[in-house]
Image (cartoon, rainbow, N blue to C red):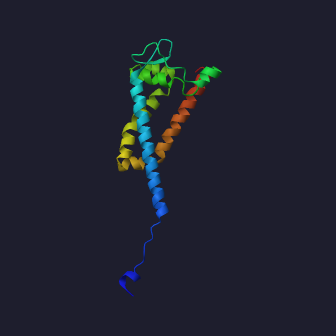
Amino acid sequence: MSVSESLPTLEVDESSSESRDRDMTHRRSHDVTMLCIAVVVLVLSFALRVRADQRVELLGLSGLPAPEMCGSRLWLGIECPGCGLTRGFIRLASGDWSSAIALNRVVPLLAFAVLAQIPYRLAMLLGWPPARRFAKSVWSNAFGWVVIVALFGNWMLKLFGI
């Protein structure tokens, strides 16, 4: 018996390797998408303005306001949990914190979440180990739930006139 015959062989499961590659590709795609969304939200916060009638328009294109975006307010006459976020981000970008919070109390929390996406997603794409550990931690899911609870809590307060 030769030495090579006596050594155990290591079989590689190609389907598991393909699955890992597919998961990594999906993860990178998700990180790129979230990074792009965060950058677009940030840029639009500075590139849009709120008109006196509370409609939103692109700077330099006065007279062409964006259409009403909230289906709940348009069709049911009540605000949704996200009502005021676009205008709030615009007000926050111009430094008007009190108006931003008056539109939706959750604006500062969501602005933090959007801003935090930029370094976080870049760190994930560059493979920085602490970012990967954070992605696997309960903190990333917990923060998402905090945002959801805050949006619905704020909505309930608004519905009761508080």
Q: List x then y, in percent, for residue 81.
A: 57, 28
Corner quadrant of residue 74: top right
| In-image side of 59 versus 55 (left or right) | left
Q: List x then y, in percent, for residue 2.
A: 37, 85
Report if residue 160 is visible in the image: no
Figure quadrant of the C terminus? top right
| In-image side of 85 versus 4 (left or right) | right
The residue under the point 51% across, 12% down is 53
Query: How many tags in the picture?
Result: 0
Identify which residue, 150 or 12, lies in the foreground.
12
Q: List x then y, in percent, for residue 22.
A: 46, 53
Report if residue 37 is visible in the image: yes
The residue under the point 39% across, 23% down is 46
Corner quadrant of residue 121: top left
The residue under the point 41% across, 41% down is 32
Q: List x then y, in percent, for residue 133.
A: 41, 50
Figure quadrant of the N terminus? bottom left
The residue under the point 41% across, 26% down is 44
Corner quadrant of residue 159: top right
Q: Identify the residue at the far right of this view.
A: 76
